[in-house]
Structures are given as C-alpha cells and as structure tokens.
Image: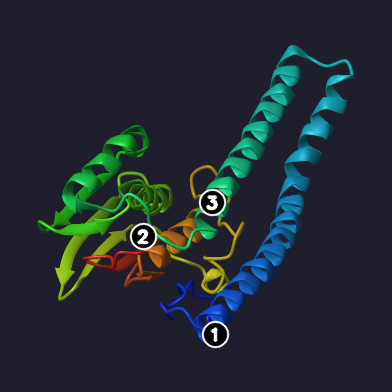
Amino acid sequence: HAVRDGEKPTLPELGRNEMSELGEAFEEMRDSLEGKQYIENYIQALTHEMKSPLAAVRGAAELLEEDMTVENRRKFLGNIRSETRRMEDLVQRLLELAAIEKRKVLENIESIEIRGLIQDVLTGLEPLINEKQLKIEVESQAVLLTGERFLLRQALVNLVKNAVEFSPKAGVVTIAARQEDEHVIITVEDSGAGIPDFAAERIFDRFFSLERPDSKKKSTGLGLPFVREVAILHRGQIEVFNKTPEGVIATLTMPARTPDQTG
C-alpha cells in the first residue's frame, strides 16, 4: 500500500525464512522497476527542459557571426552566458534531486536547534534580502529536531528564497517554528500575490515554475520537489497554499525525533 501511494517504506524485519526471502525478492524487483522508470522519466524531462536554453544559445551564436554594433554583440554574449548558467543550474539541481530521491534512509542524524538553522539560512540569503529591502520576522521557539542538518538547511533555503523572490519590494517575510505534541512545524510566509488557480495543483511538479514578479524569469522548478523529498525522508510533509488576504504560506511538518532509519 505504501509503494502504491508513492511512499518509501523500508523492508520490515521478517526473520530468516521463506517469507523473508519473498520480501527481499519483492524489494529487489521494486528497486529494478523504479530504477528503469526513474531513468526514463528523467531523460525525458531533462531533454525537454534543455531545448529552450540550447535554442537560445544557438540563436545568439548564429547572430554573432553577422556584423553588428558593439552594444548588440555585448547583449548576445550576455544571453549566451545567462542561458549557459541556466543549464548548469538545471543540471546541478537535477543531480541534487536525483540523489535524494534514490535514498531510503537518513544519514548523519543529529539534533538540530531550529533557531540557529533559520539564522544560518538568513545569513546566506542576506544579499538577496537586502536588495529587496525586505523585513524578516522570525518567531521561533527553542525547538530541537533530529535529522540531517544539510538536507533540512537546503529545504529551508528553498522555502525562504521562494518567499523572498515572490514578495514585493519592502515586503515582509515571516518564518516561525514551534513544537506541537511530537511534531515540529516550520512555516514560511511571504507577502506576495499568491499562487494562481491554474498553478495550485502543479507547484510540486518537477520543472514547473512561475515567473518571479521582479525579473519575470522562472527558476529551475526543482526547489519544491526537493523540499518534498526531504520531508518524506524525515517522515514528514510539506504543504504550500495561499493565505488570506494575500501571500503564500509553506508549512513543513516533521516528527521532532526522526525514527532511526540507519539500521
């Protein structure tokens, strides 16, 4: 049932008997089938996403063979550099997502103080925050979470960066963390225009992205899928929805103590 629902269950302990052999055989079969489908899906997706920047680079290169002003030449060279960086970013983000999607268990589990993690993320994004003159409000309890610090930091970077990019200049981004029962809940709220109706069901699709209001450019569309995989690996979940009257709120919910998955 878990495999059917897209989850990543671990093989239960079945002892040393025929049932155990059957379980291991099913596990190997699942890995083989998922691997084949996984590669096929990624090749198709990557090929599709590469077409646009490659076409832009080829077009700019062909135009550079013609006589033109120094200003236009500089413009088309800039286009080539921009599209090349876009392809590099796409490949790097795809490799990161592929690496975590193939994982079944956490590694290097440690106790993480969430307020410190949030501050670490904000320090890394400080240039972008200052450029937009945003006000950052942090409302965090003294919350501890067990998990992989690197993955949780990257997930939070994606959520906060989205909030920063979709907020208007001089807007407000609110980051909060609290513990309810046995779960830690981290929320990131922006003050932007919200998610359009047509995009509500697609925001976790690989490569799906919305234009940033300032630059009118799109991201790789791999940030939220990465966050979802981090949440699943930590036995948690991520939800993103519009809030009233404006803005978007992303809620990352995970067990305060992630079960030991290394054994």
Q: Which residue is mark 1?
A: 18
Tally the marks: 3
Q: Is residue 49 visible?
A: yes
Q: Nearer the viewer, mark 1 or mark 2?
A: 1
Q: Earlier in the sequence, mark 1 or mark 3?
A: 1
Q: Position of residue 254 (x, y in %)?
A: 29, 67
Residue at 51 percent across and 72 percent down: it is 200
Q: Which mark is residue 99?
A: 3
In this view, the residue farthest toward the left is 142
- Rounded to the nearest whole Å, what is the CA distance between mark 2 and mark 3? 17 Å
| Mark 1: few/some/many CA within 10 Å (<14, 14-19, 20+) | few
Task: Give the structural element (helix, strand or loop) at label 3.
Answer: helix
* Mark 1 residue element: helix
Taking the image as shown, residue 116 lies to the left or right of residue 85, namely left
Tell me residue 5's x, y (percent). 53, 81
Q: Which residue is mark 2?
A: 262
Amino acid under disc 3: Ala
Name the quadrant containing residue 179: bottom left
Q: Which of the 4 quarters of the picture holds residue 249?
A: bottom left
User: Is mark 1 in CB contact (under 8 Å) with mark 3?
Assistant: no
User: In the picture provided, is 125 more to the left or to the right than 60?
Assistant: left
Residue 209: percent from left, percent from top: 57, 57
Image quadrant holding the C terminus, namely: bottom left
Where is 28 relative to 155, above or below? below
Which amino acid is tagged 2?
Thr
Say left or right for 26 vs 63.
left
